[in-house]
Image: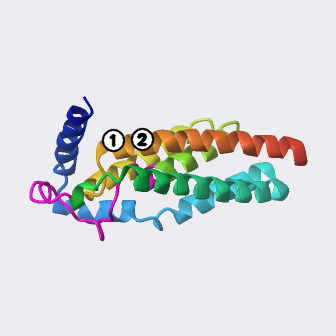
C-alpha cells in the first residue's frame, strides 16, 4: 500500500516537474528563494502594526519567531526521522526530471518551504481577516505557489509538499490562537 502510494507520488512528481521549461526557470528560482518574500513579510508585519499597534506588534514578532522556529525544527525532525531522499538525490530519477535548484539537500519529507510559508499565510491571514477578509485567500494561493516551486526545481515530491502545507496550516493556526490569547491577557485590543 505505502509502496504504491510512493510510486504514484513519484509519477505525479515527474509529471509536474516536467511541465517546466527553460523560459520559466528563472522565475521559479526566484519564487523558491527564501529571501524573495521578505518584502511581503515586512508588509504583513506593517499591516499588523497599523491594525493592532506597537505593543501588539512586539507580541506578534515574538510569536512569529517562535512559530517559524517551531515549524522549521519540527520539519527537520521529520526529515531526519523519515530519511526520505529528495527526488534530485535519486539516481534512477535524475535522467527523467528537471533539476534546476541551486543544491539538492539530503532528505525531503516534509518540505520546510511549504510548512513555513503556509504557517505564515494562515497566521497573518487569520490575524488580519477582520480587516482584510480576502487576504487569507491571497496568502494561501501564495503559499501554494511557493510549495509548487519546490516540485518545479526538483527538490520535493508532492507528498512532501502536501504534508508540509498541512503541518504549516496547523502550526499557523496554533500560533494564531497563542497570539490571540497573549493579546487578550496582556494587551488591550
Identity of the residue drawn at 42% across and 41% down: 163
Quadrant occupied by the N terminus: top left
Quadrant occupied by the C terminus: top right
Read off the magenta span. Answer: 90-114
**Secondary structure under badge 2?**
helix
Q: Is residue 158 visible?
A: yes
- Residue 94 magenta-drawn? yes
- Name the residue tied to disc 1: 159
Vertical relation: 96 (above or below) 140: below
- Residue 186 magenta-drawn? no
Residue 178, image x and y in percent?
73, 43
Vertical relation: 162 (above or below) 96: above
Residue 66, image x and y in percent?
66, 56
Identity of the residue drawn at 59% across and 56% down: 68
Label 2 packing within 10 angstroms: few (<14), some (14-19), many (20+): some
Q: Give residue 163's mark.
A: 2
**Secondary structure under badge 1?**
helix
Residue 152, image x and y in percent?
26, 54
Identity of the residue drawn at 71% across and 53% down: 63
Magenta: predominant secondary structure element? loop
Residue 26, image x and y in percent?
28, 66
- Is residue 167 rendered to the left or right of residue 125? left
- Is residue 82 rendered to the left or right of residue 54? left
Amino acid at each position: 500500500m505505502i509502496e504504491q502510494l510512493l510510486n504514484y507520488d513519484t509519477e505525479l512528481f515527474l509529471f509536474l516537474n516536467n511541465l517546466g521549461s527553460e523560459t520559466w526557470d528563472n522565475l521559479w528560482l526566484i519564487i523558491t528563494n527564501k529571501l524573495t518574500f521578505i518584502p511581503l513579510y515586512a508588509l504583513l508585519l506593517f499591516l499588523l502594526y497599523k491594525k493592532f499597534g506597537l505593543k501588539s506588534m512586539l507580541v506578534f514578532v515574538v510569536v512569529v519567531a517562535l512559530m517559524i522556529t517551531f515549524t522549521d525544527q519540527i520539519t527537520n525532525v521529520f526529515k531526519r526521522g523519515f530519511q526520505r531522499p529528495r527526488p534530485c538525490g535519486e539516481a534512477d530519477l535524475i535522467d527523467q526530471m528537471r533539476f534546476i535548484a541551486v543544491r539538492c539537500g539530503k532528505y525531503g519529507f516534509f518540505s520546510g518551504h511549504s510548512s513555513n510559508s503556509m504557517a505564515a499565510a494562515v497566521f497573518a491571514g487569520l490575524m488580519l481577516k477582520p480587516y482584510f477578509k480576502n487576504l487569507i485567500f491571497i496568502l494561501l494561493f501564495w503559499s501554494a505557489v511557493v510549495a509548487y516551486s519546490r516540485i518545479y526545481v526538483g527538490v520535493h515530491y508532492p507528498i512532501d509538499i502536501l504534508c508540509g502545507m498541512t503541518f504549516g496550516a496547523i502550526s499557523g493556526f496554533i500560533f494564531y490562537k497563542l497570539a490571540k490569547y497573549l493579546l487578550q491577557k496582556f494587551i488591550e485590543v
